[in-house]
Amino acid sequence: MCSRWATVLVALVSAGVVALVAAGPASAHSFLAATDPPQGARLAAAPDSVALQLSEAVVPGSALISVRRADGIDVVIPPPATESGDTVVRQPLPGVGAGVYLVSWQVTSAVDGHDSAGELAFAVGTDPSAEVPLAATGIPDVEPFAAVVAWGFFTGLAVASGGLTRRYLLGGAEGGHRWVRAGAIVALTSLLARSAVEGPQAVGARPTIALALPAAAVLLALVPPLARVRTAIPAGLLIAAAVTWSARSHSAASYGMAGAVLDAVHLVAAAAWAGALAQVVDVLWRDHRAGRAVRLEPVRRYARPALWLVVAVSLSGLGQAALLLPRWQAVWSTAYGQVLMVKTVLLAAALSTAAVARQRGLPGGRPRLLRRATASELWLVAGVLGAAALLVTTPPPAPTAALESLLGPPPITGPTVRAMDLAGSLTVDIAAGQDRLDVWVVSPSGGVEGATVDIAAVMPDGTTGELHPRPCGPGCFTQEMELPAGTTRLQVAAHAPGWTGGRMGADLVWPPPAARPERFDAMAQAMRAADEVTVTESVTSDAAGEATGASQATMSGAAFVDLMPWAGGGAVDVRPIEGRPDTFTFYLPGSRMFFEATVDAYGRLEYQRMVNPGHEIGYTLEYPAPAPTSSATEQARPR
């Protein structure tokens, strides 16, 4: 599984030979040609090592490789080593057992100092149909200070909200502004503390998220001086502060605006419930200590909207749980789920005590029962706010995925027919073996989520039909298919959200011509022997568009080879094209690149067509004079 970094680096080739060679070979980039084991391999026994074959030498000691299981557990590995003139990086894998492993790598080119990075996955003795979480499920460390800060914000918001309800509960009595001020100051202090501890690096490169806490702090700072004015103004400021806080919630991070709104409803309803309840408890206990008759009207006024607030808290909480818990097992198997269970139990207990107060204490005017029930309810709601603060600082469980979606289809073994071309701004990569057809829809950043394909096939006998392969990951489709002898013509229409789709055609010849890897080696050798070559390049990034204006550069044949992704070898499926003895194709699996090469009588390149994710690049090569006959060029002649 090549990462976005790897595929983006692949697309750098399309910047043009002239741009790459203006300063000579030092402008090349290191491309991944092949890996051992290959991406998606299903192995019966664990390999001793992972090897990365690159297009050029890397700086010794620069390779950074990490290996982790699909469930997020890191594998302890020794430092990697380089081989074959530092073009192969080998990572030993001692003590690796059954499982799916993700290998992330980064290397630095010894030619120009540029970094290349990528990722691949393989399985050892594991059922690919099984599902695993995409991150470790162990209980992570929760920073106590962060949880305290979040609890302070929630509590301050509740206290301020309660102050706004005091006039309503007491029938117009004043005094609520003191609660509003105190709560706003506590919430503001908590926000400033969180901002100081986290810093801007905690929110990445999303400016709207980065501004959430400062914006909430500004809103809260306006509340104390406006606490005495009309209730609607400070209430609006408190709600706005809660909404901005929710912009940094787990729900917002996973589901954008919809998640932020759901979290804001939950937070505002909970703060209003807790704040109003605190005012009721205050009134009841003040009357008790003063020896006055208990005022039941504030309790009745509170009971009317409290039911709807509890409904809002419960439904929004259930909605967030459904969004953030990928499976029911996560409720008891993850830290987030366990804290959520505690919060749910506390909420249920608070609702039970509220029911006792409403059904038994309020109708008969039993002040002692009301005091105890409402006080107990308040303590339980405070516990709910504490559990909510823990949830804020506990990462939700990662979604599960079938191992097959991480691995993709297993590499085709045996003879393989390949084709690759643009379909609009997308690229369709086809591989077919004796009994399987794989189709990939890729962009410059890798397999495309939500991609679809429509495939029509014309068989060698002229019959036509439609193919309906099953999805096997982002942009991946596969099906069992036994190619008949002869040429099967495929017409593939590819589409994906956010990309211009299109059509591409491919002729799959079965059985394929015998592989001729020696032709690739002879071509590379003949090119390195060329003293001078003029290269004309054209680039196409959309099948419906025209190629960019041709660019030319003159260099040695060796310099041209050093600029090519195949410079370090690693080409597979080197096969001649039937009826064209001077042309052959080959493929670089590590970087998903397809090449069609035409050579002259001396084995040197005359034309090369290269297709990579998002681009088609053509190279026309001209030489100043016929090459002298030598044993090398004689061996390079096509046969």
Image (spheres, helix red, strand yellow):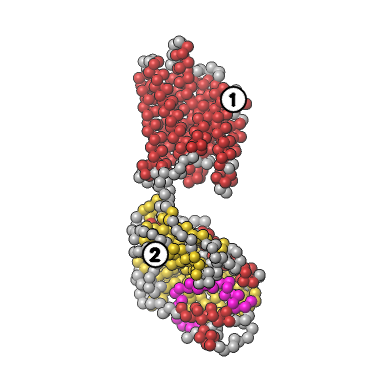
Q: Mark 2 falls on what kind of element?
A: loop
Question: Magenta segment range?
Answer: 555-582
**Contact (Cβ within 8 Å) of mark 2 with mark 1:** no
The residue wearing badge 1 is: 227
Residue 568 in picture, x, y percent from top left:
52, 72
Q: Position of residue 558 (x, y in %)?
A: 59, 77
Query: What amino acid does circle 1 point to?
Result: Ala
| Labels in figure, total | 2
Residue sitting nearer the eye, 423 or 567: 567
Disc assigned to residue 425:
none
* On-image quarter of the N terminus: bottom left
Is residue 143 visible to the viewer in this orientation of the structure?
A: yes
Query: From the viewer's perspective, is the residue at label 2 or at label 1 nearer?
Result: 2
Label 2 packing within 10 angstroms: few (<14), some (14-19), many (20+): some
What residue is shown with label 2?
Answer: 47
Q: Is residue 112 magenta?
A: no
User: Reading the chain from its start, which is encountered first: label 2 or label 1?
Assistant: 2
Q: Is residue 557 magenta?
A: yes
